[in-house]
Amino acid sequence: MTNYRAFEMDSRNAYIRHDSFSDLAQVDAVIFDCDGVLIDTKESYDQAVLFTAGRLSSVILGLDYSNLYSRQDLYALRSTGGFNNDWDLTCALVSYTLSLNQTESMAELLREASGLGLEKRIKYVGRRVNGNSSYIPPKIDALANQLDVTGLKALDTFYKEKGMTDFIEALNEVLSYPGDVGESPITTMFEEVFCGGSLYSEIYGREPVFVKLRTGLIEQEKLIVNPAMLEELSQYVDGRLGIASGSLKAQAEYILNPILDYFRPEACIWMDDVDEAKRETGRSDLHKPNPYSLLQAAAQLNAVMVLYVGDTQADLMMAKNASRDLGVVFAGVYADSADPSRMKTDFMQAGSDIVTPSVNELTIILGEDVF
């Protein structure tokens, strides 16, 4: 890309837009997304989406749920900017797959199942569908091309245009989404497999009903960020480090505990905080790419120019939206993506100020060796 200057970083390149150097020289605070940036979640959140979507879809259709979806499918939907929330992502995979394979009898079974208990709804339909010999596999890349930053709202419009409204309404009665853990099979199963039995019960105050594991996928997570880099970065910005993430606070802090002291607590904004703001304001649009969480975190750091570090198009869009009210530059990390080469190219085409393999190159990028 001719708009970027490349720098070799441990055999992988980082890139800085030529017209971003002056802003980068003014950075005096850094705010991070969490999953995929500070924490490697390939074997946790991604696998929780793949498992939950695959399990729900296949049980209803009477299919083998292994390998029903791929990480490339997740990337395709996330690249629209509308599926930063993994529960939304799971819902989209399930509803689209079932919409392709809908039948009149399935719609009727869904309506019958809607009044049953949480753990019985899915099995009720699946036991009576008895398999689907004409299964149509979903082409998620093609679906993503029809969607946009509005996520599930765009998907609902897609269904209406395809004349699927009645079926989707029947499906939504069974999935109860959006709905809290304990209300929706999507959120409940997802959190059960992600947390594992003990942590799930500790956080949600209930026993698992779908997946009864002693330990969950969260135990597969590991830190990406190097504490030594954080120490150096903290000194560079006088301790002005924060987090603006769509993660739930309890799950994120479970893994971040060894490095939490580097971040100012008041400048850490989580999904829980955004949900609380939604309840207080009556607004439903405060999650990414809305800049609410980034602006709230930045307000606590009293900074002139904030560097926000993310790993999705929703993160980049949020930074751009925040730039109307805040001095902000964006760094997109790509090495831990399902498709690093594609992620790197997508960030460049979208105009990211920095495109870098990981967070661990930040002190080099902000240091005098680059400038």
Image: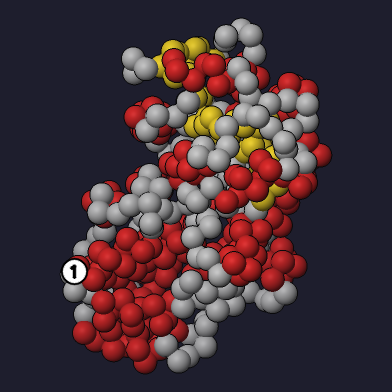
Asked which quadrant contains residue 4, the reply is top left
Mark 1 Cα-neighbour bin, 10 Å: few <14, some 14–19, many ≥20: few
Q: How many labels does the image show?
A: 1
Pick the quarter of the image with the C terminus: top right
User: Is residue 218 at least partly visible in the picture?
Assistant: no
Q: Which of 3 and 208 is in front in this view?
A: 3
Q: What residue occupies the far front of the structure in this picture?
A: 325
Q: Which of 304 and 168 is in front in this view?
A: 304
Quarter of the figure that contains the N terminus: top left
Residue 122 position in % (x across, y down):
43, 80
At 54% from the left edge and 52% from the top edge, which residue is drawn?
45
Kindly give the residue lying farthest to the right in the view shown: 261
The residue located at (53%, 66%) in the rendering is 283
Q: Relative to residue 353, is residue 202 depicted above or below?
A: below
Residue identified by numbered label 1: 162
Task: Give the camera-side residue of 94 and 235.
Answer: 235
Give the residue displayed 25% in from the left and 54% down from the top: 146
Percent across and percent down for residue 151 are 38, 58
**Residue type highlighted by circle 1:** Lys
Left or right relative to 215: residue 67: left
Whether residue 174 can be seen here: yes
Q: Left or right: 123 with respect to 275?
A: left
Element carrying mark 1: loop
Q: Which residue is drawn at 21% across and 84% down?
A: 104
Q: In which quarter of the image is residue 62?
A: bottom left
Residue 272 placement (x, y as % from top left): 65, 60
Residue 166's image quarter? bottom left
Residue 63 at x, y percent in the picture: 33, 69
Image color mode: secondary structure
